[in-house]
Image (cartoon, coloured by chain):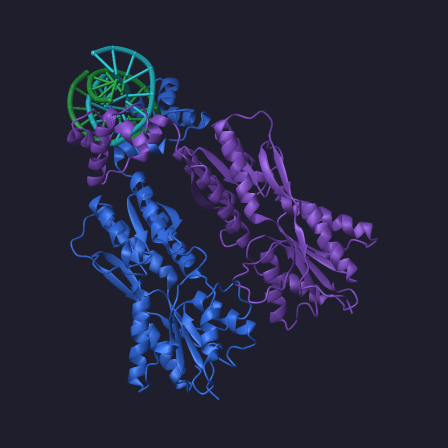
Chain colours: A blue, B purple, C green, D cyan
Amino acid sequence: MVSIYDIAKRAQCSTMTVSRVINNTGRISEKTRQRVKAIMAEMNYVPNQAARSLVLQQTKIISLLITDITNPFYTTLARGAEDAAKRLGYQVMFSNSDENLDKEKEYIDTVLSMRVDGVLIAPAGDHSVEHLEKLRQYNIPFVLVDREVPGVESDRVLGDSKEGSKALVEHLIALGHRRIAFINGSLDISTARMRRAGYLETLKLNDIEVQPDYMFDTTYSRFDADPIIEKMIAMPKSKRPTAIFAANNFITLAAIRSLRAKGLRVPEDFSIVCFDDLDPDYIVDPFLTIAAQPAYDFGRIGMQMLIDRIHGPIDEYRSVILPSKLLVRQSSTPLT
Amino acid sequence: MVSIYDIAKRAQCSTMTVSRVINNTGRISEKTRQRVKAIMAEMNYVPNQAARSLVLQQTKIISLLITDITNPFYTTLARGAEDAAKRLGYQVMFSNSDENLDKEKEYIDTVLSMRVDGVLIAPAGDHSVEHLEKLRQYNIPFVLVDREVPGVESDRVLGDSKEGSKALVEHLIALGHRRIAFINGSLDISTARMRRAGYLETLKLNDIEVQPDYMFDTTYSRFDADPIIEKMIAMPKSKRPTAIFAANNFITLAAIRSLRAKGLRVPEDFSIVCFDDLDPDYIVDPFLTIAAQPAYDFGRIGMQMLIDRIHGPIDEYRSVILPSKLLVRQSSTPLT
DNA sequence: TTGTACGCGTTATCAA
DNA sequence: TTGATAACGCGTACAA
């Protein structure tokens, strides 16, 4: 493997001179610069990052950990993060925790061993606190995106899950629905708690009694909704929910699949609303009524904040709350 | 940042001893091993990969370059590659070229500067030859997956695009179709050429004259099919195709969207078949007739071959050709 | 069983 | 404008 030393030998100069050409630092005569450049091109020289980061104590790499690489919300977020990073001269290393704390732990160790310059992370849950403390201990800047973790002070970019929930549930109520089921993610995740709070508050505001039977806690990832749907269907018709508030897009997908398999239709038999879009390119006719979050901006702004912090220590932690937008489509209809 | 030296100082031993504990090499008294281990845990020591790979001349990282991270064929392939790599003690770094040679070039430089141990790559096209030669020059082992590149000798895992095409077109012909359009990817890509060959050969075998008007070259990525569909629709009804062979899943998606927007239906107005599935979890009712390729095995086998080669130099290059399987579903129906 | 000294490829400091 | 030298953190001959 050709090194800076080989170049120097061929160019009859010191490695320092070569280094200066590579990094455009210091003053060099145009003549030597050209000579060295030519030789580097000829020998197809590529600097060794490992050696570089060893001495520079920085890698120009930022880690992005998301919890579900197949969810368009996160892939869009990743795109935003990548674009911002590139603009600012950083590379992004992606990883996927699959909502799994063990995988997250492994990942954190990898990240530490690589000495990345910073971490943009959507934590798997409240127990991520340990992992974040490890980052803190090593002085590796991190920014939370999408989810916060109790007990962890940090920069963060969050959605307004409570307001978004309220808008969705209000929308259903405005359509005449009063028996509204709520299929949520794990309560170990901050957004699930916020969405729950929004649901409960809106019911109360509208004098609708909360039915514990209508509330289900599952997971944000892909899963089988059959058991839940079966429970709902088993209720007497006069008590059966007429609408479903699903906490995210994949829960909705699972619910719709399960309903269809049982011969039930959306929105004829059940209205359904949720957070976040499905991949628009996949869906020939977008029909979900959703609270749309600006996923790209989650990534873009989070990355900006992170790189800010890498560049110069900032005293206070900053929070950005991004609003969601209600998009009414065909999955919700007035109660007949 | 705590280093091996800090541990040694606290444990009152040499760095050599600490290193031996970390790597389980050499003979160490159980007592010192325990002492050192305790101190490492207490100080939350994490080895510095950069330093490590600098001296070891290996990173235990393998790069995987795919051309479209949103295509389930490639994400499934990636999953197979990752599982195999993990099993064999390697980490995978993913990247996405977006079918773009410039991005691929950038990526190759990154990979070289990181001195990864090997590269598993689905090349963006025939011009990738330059990039592959650069890898070759640096003695970085690589394996081609899904696509081959003329002029590049290497290990490779490919699908049987020609046979798959033949099966799809034969299927359409068996259903009574004779006016079969073919929307292909870029002919700069080996699979597109093979699929084309399969299409042409099958028509000939069935005494169907090739209509250049029926053949369109586009791209495997997401794109707008409107111009193509409009050309098809503009033909007099007696000449208009009754079926479409789309080279991959995204082309199909684009075609169906465009058809629907124009009030045309699949399969009532057009039968359509293609290579590779859509994300099954997204699609409530899978209905595409496809030539299904074993995407996971592409990744798994490719990674195996790559790591084999990293471990011990192998004389001959190996090719694996994976067959596809015809899955007849609802997007194709008999011609009425 | 343990330790010393060097080298991996690069950059920063300081001197020429 | 250039170069000699040390340093980054770790693993390994070799010595003790």
Identify the residue at image location x=36%, y=27%.
B56
Q: Position of residue A116 (x, y in %)?
A: 30, 42
Identify the residue at image location x=23%, y=31%.
B4
Q: Nearer the viewer, residue A202 or B255?
A: A202
Q: Position of residue B183 (x, y in %)?
A: 66, 56
Q: Nearer the viewer, residue A78 or B327?
A: B327
Q: Does A138 appear above or below A24?
A: below
* Extreme residue toward the front, this view: B30
Q: How many marks?
A: 0
Quarter of the rendering containing residue A145: bottom left
Q: Does B235 appear above or below B14?
A: below
Identify the residue at image location x=24%, y=57%.
A155
B214 with respect to A85 (left or right): right
B309 with respect to A88 (left or right): right
Q: Position of residue B264 (x, y in %)?
A: 66, 71
B11 with respect to B23 (left or right): left
The reply to whether residue A23 is in sight is no
Q: Quadrant of the N terminus of chain A?
A: top left
Q: Nearer the viewer, residue A300 or A36?
A: A300
Q: Does A113 appear above or below A31?
A: below
Q: Position of residue A309 (x, y in %)?
A: 23, 50
Identify the residue at image location x=50%, y=73%.
A287
The reply to whether residue B332 is in sight is yes
